[in-house]
Image: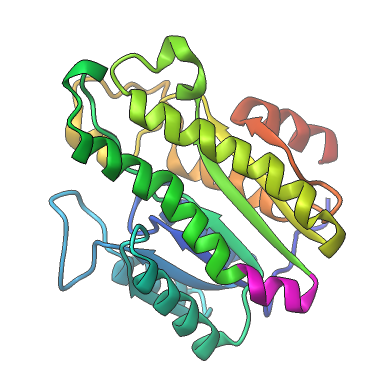
């Protein structure tokens, strides 16, 4: 299959300081795209978990692509609007949006404070809505675009025990994906979702549960490739929420 050329395209990836977000950003950059990396971890405001958007932006530039690192709390509307404006000021367009940023809180539902419930829903669902609304007008104006929402196997009730707010946020994100795809299909804007149904050896997973990490776990790079595949389908391929296994089976058929 002929390699996909994204030269001139601009991809915005949330949660791009490490893990799956970083891997997706690098996959788009290797295909020629210019990248906007956004997260809260920067060189000036690092997290205890390794990785910053500044580091990822430098890796993108090392490939000869344009890169912009913008610190943003995607639950805050003003910050998201500033992110969109920075992107358009720097590159003049937006072709791909990956709503990847997410947080989690582990506790039984009865012991989950409302402030934690609100945090998870505000980042995982509201944040994706805000980012989509901020970049959508430009996509509508151009009559093209691709949005990928990153979901989770936690939408399965049996896997949601102890992480109910996270599961609810991802279930909402999947409904948003399907409903928005129908609305935007006439405008040639694709909206698809990736449901991550297995454990991934991201920096966060290694940091918080080093003893649980197994060689059988997926790598962020493999998941980044799944996101890349979904984001680069024809506009008619829209409204799908696929597991990683389903994406990889489809990749084999189209190889």
Q: Seen from this angle, which residue lies furthest top?
A: 158
* Dominant secondary structure, magenta: helix
**Relative vertical location of residue 216 with respect to residue 130 in this rendering, above or below:** above
* 116 with respect to 93 (left or right): left
Where's residue 118, x and y in %?
Answer: 29, 42
Residue 215 in sight: yes
Return the residue nearer the eye: 221 or 86: 86
Q: Quadrant of residue 188?
A: bottom right
Q: Which residues are magenta?
A: 136-143
Q: Quadrant of residue 5?
A: bottom right
**Relative vertical location of residue 135 with respect to residue 255 in this rendering, above or below:** below
Return the residue nearer the eye: 247 or 160: 160
Q: Quadrant of residue 190?
A: bottom right
Where's residue 95, x and y in %?
Answer: 66, 70
The verdict on residue 252 being magenta is no
Where's residue 221, x and y in %?
Answer: 48, 45
Residue in the image at 37% along x and 23% along y: 215
Where's residue 50, x and y in %?
Answer: 21, 52
Residue in the image at 66% along x and 32% along y: 242
Residue 32 in sight: no
């Amino acid at each position: 299959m002929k390699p996909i050329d994204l030269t001139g395209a601009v991809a915005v990836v949330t949660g791009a300081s490490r893990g799956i977000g970083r891997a997706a950003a690098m996959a788009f950059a290797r295909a020629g795209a210019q990248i906007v990396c956004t997260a809260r971890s920067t060189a000036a405001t690092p997290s205890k978990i390794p990785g910053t958007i500044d580091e990822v932006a430098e890796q993108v530039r090392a490939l000869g692509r344009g890169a912009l690192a913008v610190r943003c709390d995607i639950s805050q509307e003003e910050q998201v609007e500033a992110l969109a404006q920075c992107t358009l000021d720097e590159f003049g367009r937006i072709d791909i949006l990956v709503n990847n940023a997410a947080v989690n809180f582990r506790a039984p539902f009865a012991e989950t404070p409302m402030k934690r419930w609100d945090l998870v829903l505000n980042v995982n669902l509201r944040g994706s809505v805000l980012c989509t609304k901020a970049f959508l007008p430009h996509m509508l104006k151009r009559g093209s675009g691709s949005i990928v929402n990153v979901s989770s196997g936690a939408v399965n009730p049996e896997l949601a025990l102890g992480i109910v707010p996270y599961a609810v946020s991802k279930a909402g994100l999947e409904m948003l994906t399907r409903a928005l795809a129908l609305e935007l299909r006439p405008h040639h804007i694709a909206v698809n979702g990736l449901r991550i149904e297995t454990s991934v050896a991201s920096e966060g997973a290694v940091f918080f549960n080093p003893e649980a990490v197994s060689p059988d776990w997926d790598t962020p790079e493999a998941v980044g490739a799944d996101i890349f595949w979904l984001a680069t389908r024809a506009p008619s391929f829209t409204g799908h929420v696929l597991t990683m296994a389903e994406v990889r089976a489809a990749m084999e058929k189209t190889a």
